[in-house]
Image: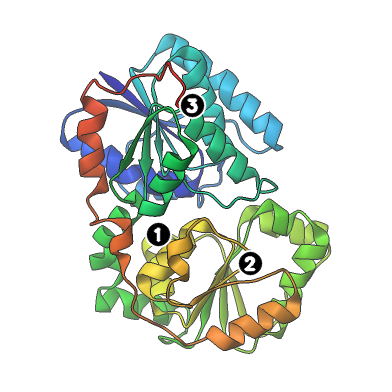
Amino acid sequence: MLVSIVTGTRPQIIKSAPVIHAMRQQGVDYEFVHTGQHYDFELAQSFVNDFDLSKPFNLHVGSGDYCYQVYSTIERLSDHYQKNRPDIMIVPGDTTSALGASMVGFKMEIPVCHLESGLRRYDLTVQEELNRRLIDHGSSALFAPTPTAAENLELERVQGEVYMLGDTMYDVLKNRMKIFLDPPFQEEVLSKYNVSTGDYAIMTFHRREHVDVKSNLEQIVNAINQLEFPIILAMHPRTKKNLIDAHLELKSPNLRVVAPLPYDEFMCLMANAGLAISDSGGIQKESYILGTPLVSLHNCTEWVETLKYGKHRLGELKTDRILNDCKDLFGKRYESDPSVYGDGKSAEKILPILLSGEVKIPTKLRY
């Protein structure tokens, strides 16, 4: 049996890493495909190196608008599968790469297993919401990361089999804690950025609805320039380009802009930060697990579990609102209950299902 796992972005590599390691340990015949949606070294290859993954087969889709990336993924992956057809596919997440890859599986009648299925924001203006719904309703096996996600799938009466086995991103984080929470490593990282535990914020933002719309980007920049505590901003290439194109200047003396960081370094900084500010879905989970208060640049979330303790604040793209939320939550670290994301062994439970021979393409609708 040949298993093909398809990624396109850095978060997808993180989600896939535990499954790839589990397959490697069990001697499973697999291939690792990367679409090239994230093509910068810091956003892709560095994480392949960080997690000791084999070099992926790269489709070199590259940058482009939504339709181009979906079309190119379909065209190039289907060509590849004509020569090297897998028995089963794993598609993580909700990116354009995930949608394009799943469409190839549906068309070629290859069973698609959706990793991180069932997430719902109930806002179809968010492209990822449409992507994940389309993928879920065509998949053969749906691996829901939380009870809420599994319930969403049952309510929608999806055709495939639903499994609630935990979140593979938690597998990664729990396993790597021994590295990024190691005292000498923490001391080295904090010294590198000249910060101390709890006295700074870690920040990322890159969503198209935030950085492609100048008025929204301007609200975020204005907030950054007025915040009075140190900020480490891990700059996404898309964000950097749009700041230049929009002639917007980050001029806070408290700001340090860095390139996208290696996983362990970023997790160390988040684990020691007084606040995280982001529009990332993954950071919503990671900050919750690490007990770091978070200001989201969203007004809704698919990760509803992270709202439990009141230390994940959903907001709006208004400078004053961002400033008030940041000032209110800064320094208010807390203890959370990460068990909602499983026991850190999700991949070990997923693998027997993949190899069971029982993952079949659904042929009948559920009513």
What's the CA distance linking mark 2 and mark 3? Answer: 31 Å
Q: Nearer the viewer, mark 1 or mark 3?
A: 3
Describe the element under mark 2 as helix, strand or loop.
loop
Disc 1 or 3, which lies upstream in sequence? 3
Q: Residues within 10 Å of mark 1 (few under 14, many from 20)?
A: some
- Which residue is at a point 51% across and 47% down the rendered structure image? 41
**Rendering quarter of residue 188:** bottom left
Tell whether label 3 touches label 1 (CB within 8 Å).
no
Can residue 87 be seen from the camera position used here?
A: yes
The label nearer to you, 1 versus 2, is 2
Badge 2 vs badge 3, beta-carbon distance below 8 Å: no
Question: Toward which corner of the image does residue 32 lie, by quadrant?
Answer: top left
**Residue where numbered disc 1 is placed:** 263
Residue closest to the far top: 82
Identify the disc placed on residue 138.
Answer: 3
Residue visible at 20% across and 25% down in the picture = 356
- Residue 48 lies, in percent from the top left, at 38, 45
Instruction: State the image coordinates of residue 114 (x, y, percent, origin top left).
Output: 41, 35
As helix, strand or loop, the secondary structure at mark 1 comes to helix
Above or below, 216 relative to 309 = above
Point out the residue furthest to the left here.
26
- Mark drawn on residue 297: 2
Q: Residue 194, percent across and down?
A: 47, 84
- On screen, 73 above or below 317? above
Q: Look at 32% across and 57% down and name the residue there.
A: 341
Q: Tell me which label, 2 or 3, sits earlier in the chain.
A: 3
- Against 102, residue 259 (above or below) is below
The amino acid sitting under disc 3 is Gly
Q: Quadrant of the N terminus?
A: top left
- On the image, the x and y values in percent for residue 199 come to 48, 88
User: Label 2 sits on what residue type?
Assistant: Leu
